[in-house]
Image: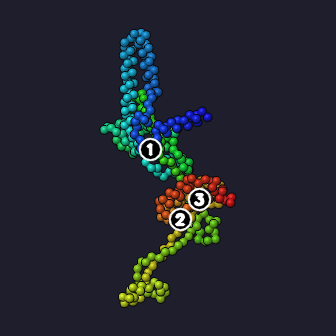
Amino acid sequence: MLKKWFMRQKSHWLDKRIPIAQAYTFDVNNTFIMPSIFGWSVIGISVCLFVLGTNYQNNIILLVCYFLIALLLLSLFQSYFYFTRFSIKFNNADEYYANRDVTLRADIQFAHKESFGQLMYRYSKSIDNVINIEHDTLFQHLKLGKFARGQHNLDRLTFSSTYPFGLFRCWTHLAIPFSLNVYPEPIKAALVVNNTEQNDKADAQRLVSSSSEELQGIREYSTTDPIHHVSWKHVAKGQGLLSKDFAEHVSAKTILRLKPNSSLNLELELSKLTYLVNQLSRHSQTFGLELGRQQILPNTGEGHRLQCLKELATFSINDFFTEHQR
């Protein structure tokens, strides 16, 4: 209980101290600095040397003590100035799927004519990941770990550095300016289509065919051609009876649905639907999606695909039960 209260107060304080933004520049307002474990050890040794040198009036011991204090002060300022030369910009999230490593795209800039040192980052309770600074601008994929299906509000991302001497640790907690939609893991599945209207409600998919006519040329008139296909424009010019040649196209509109027994293995069925959504979109086919009370009308395009994937990511089994209990 006390730990939760402390974390809640810490979160409120960080929201005021370091507000959410798309880009950050490390400065005095968002940077913290404290001695590292090694630094505390050196401080302890300096105190002991000062006590010994003072009690025994040993100038050599005091000289070593003052050298360590000077090294600590130099490391304090150098660590801070190095860390505050960084700026980070978070880019829009990519597509993420469950049970796969999630990486966050970020542009890291280092405001110095020479690139050197290291920058570390950590998400949540994971271990520190090291970024070697080799260029003034770095395009990084920051590893966040694996997430379950759904929409996630991300925790703050911690950046830190102990460069150059390892005596002081500078760090900051940056808020990620967008939520994360984690789609179900795609699992290969076959698209089953029924052409009969009677079994449409019992199947997971249905096919609705619509035809359209497109003029593709002029040919000689045949007695089997409809009279409205005659090109009267050519007749008026005295070129005889000619017929307009139309190409008929059949467009298939597929409706993807959960099977009636999907509640027994919901995640597997959602994963199969995710695979079918990506496959149909890749082939520019028109399709719709029905998930319990949620219905998306047939359409095509990247926006339609992302809308279907978002519904699959946020779908709750309670919606499925509510729909079938009616």
Cα distance in 3D space between marks 2 and 3: 13 Å
Type of the residue with mark 3: Gln
Tag 2's secondary structure? strand
Q: Is residue 181 visible?
A: yes
Quarter in which the N terminus is drawn: top right
- As measured in the structure, the alpha-carbon distance from the residue carrying label 1 to the one carrying label 3 is 33 Å
Q: What residue do we see at 48% from left, 85% from top? A: 226
Query: Measuring 38% from the left and 43% from the top, which residue is drawn there?
Result: 138
- Looking at marks 1 and 2 on the same chain, the residue that comes earlier in the sequence is marked by 1
Residue that badge 2 annotates? 298
- Mark 1 and 2 residues: CB-CB less than 8 Å, in contact? no
* Residue at the spot 52% in from the left edge and 35% down from the top edge: 10
| Figure check: 298 above or below 11 | below
Q: Secondary structure at mark 1?
A: loop
Q: Amino acid at mark 2?
A: Pro
> How far across and how far down the image is residue 71, in percent?
37, 24
> Pointer 1: what residue?
21
Q: Quadrant of residue 90?
A: top left
Q: Nearer the viewer, residue 195 or 83?
A: 83
Res 143 seen here = no
Q: Which residue is mark 3?
A: 294
Vertical comparison of 90 with 246: above or below: above
- The quarter holding residue 115 reads top left
> How far across and how far down the image is residue 297, in percent?
54, 64
Q: Position of residue 178 (x, y in %)?
A: 48, 47
Q: Position of residue 247 (x, y in %)?
A: 46, 77
User: SS class of the residue under badge 3?
Assistant: strand
Q: How is the rendered protein coloured?
A: rainbow
